[in-house]
Image: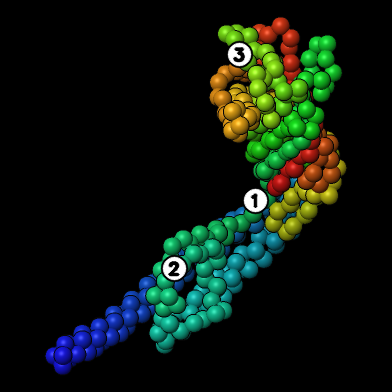
Amino acid sequence: MKTITKIVVLISVCFIVGNASAQDTIQKTNNTTKIENLEQLKEAIKNEEREFLKAEVEAINQRLDRGEITAENAEQLKKEAAQKRALNIENRIAIIDNKIALMKRNDSDYQNYDDNENNGFKITFGGEKDEHTFVNIKRKNSPPKYDLRTTTDLVFAIGINNTIADGESIGDSYETLGSGFVELGLAWKTRVFQNSNALRLKYGFSFQWNKLSPKDDKYFVQNGDVTSLEVFPGNLNESEFRVTNLVFPVHFEFGPSKKIDKKNYFRYSTHNQFKFGIGGYAGFNIGTQQKLRYKEDGDRVKEKIRRNYNTSDFVYGLSAYVGFDTMSLYAKYDISTVFKDQVVDQNNVSLGIRFDLD
């Protein structure tokens, strides 16, 4: 028993000593790595400030070409920009040198809470001292472009959906509130004129989900080239018919803008402004599905049927929106029919709320 105890104690002591030695090695390695990274950061700072200076000189030249400043003013502004960037390099490198001196005097577990060298997003795992970086995403500190004519928006829309057909009124065949649409996409907005943002061209791609909920316990049946609504032969609780499209919208957008002038760049802002857009879209049907919920022999059955149902492969239509800031009233109409080559043509029509988030 004593022998076993001695062995356990000996192993524990070896483990503790080894772990302490390893931690000391890791600390030294971590400090060395950090110092090497900071040395590399010095060169990156010089390159970054040179890029900022290049952008500022370009902005000054554009102002000179526009006749906003004289050649003498332009030279003076360039001189001031060069002096500022030179001082920035000197000050930032001095800060790095101080960090290096601080690390050389202390172990790696010395917490420097005012250190902001990791300007980004980081996920770590492990203990406080045994920490490993899993994800480290840093923002690139780059100079702004003097004139940014194209911006990007995330587009989201939701609302009610129905059809227009010969001899029928909207809502005759499908539930008004039970039928709806959702649209999600990405759009680019480009200023058309050089010195005005009154007209913008908006273009991109979107996924559209158009849903129809038939009335009177009916569902869609495909018999060869014919698709028709028929009464379900049973106790039908719910019937949903959904068509998924990938479309490429193009709109002309009109509205006032606020011009924001900065020293090195300018922007046109449409925040808190009215806007009106009109255009259209074209694309492809990428999926059709019918979902049925019914009771059979006392059991609840949920059935999803994926097939063509003779829906149009190519879709196109008109759309428009009017709104304020990021929110708009949105309407779209499919010129293409829901089903191709049918006795009665049906065209999707949608009305809802649209959000353009930049």
Q: Earlier in the sequence, mark 2 or mark 3?
A: 2
Q: Residue visible at 76% across and 22% down?
A: 216
Question: Mark 3 against mark 1, which lies toward the viewer?
Answer: 3
Give the label, 2 or 3, closer to the camera.
Answer: 3
Q: Which mark is residue 145?
A: 1
Quickly name the residue at label 2. 125
Q: Position of residue 31 (x, y in %)?
A: 38, 78
Front residue of 100 and 108: 108
| 309 or 72, nearer to the observer | 309
- Give the percent coordinates (x, y) of residue 336: 70, 17
Q: Secondary structure under badge 2?
A: strand
Vertical placement of 351 versus 138: above or below? above
Of the two numbered discs 1 and 2 on the same chain, state the one appearing first in sequence. 2
Residue 21 visible within the image = no
Q: Which mark is residue 222?
A: 3
In the image as oriented, which residue stretches furthest toward the left? 3
Mark 2, Cα crowd under 10 Å, few <14 / some 14-19 / many 20+, is: few
Give above or below for 147 relative to 173: below
Q: Amino acid at mark 2?
A: Phe
Residue at the extreme front of the image, as rendered: 297
Q: Relative to residue 202, is residue 51 drawn left or right?
A: left
Query: How much space separates mark 2 and mark 3, taking CA atoms?
Result: 56 Å
Name the secondary structure under disc 3: strand
* SS class, disc 1: loop
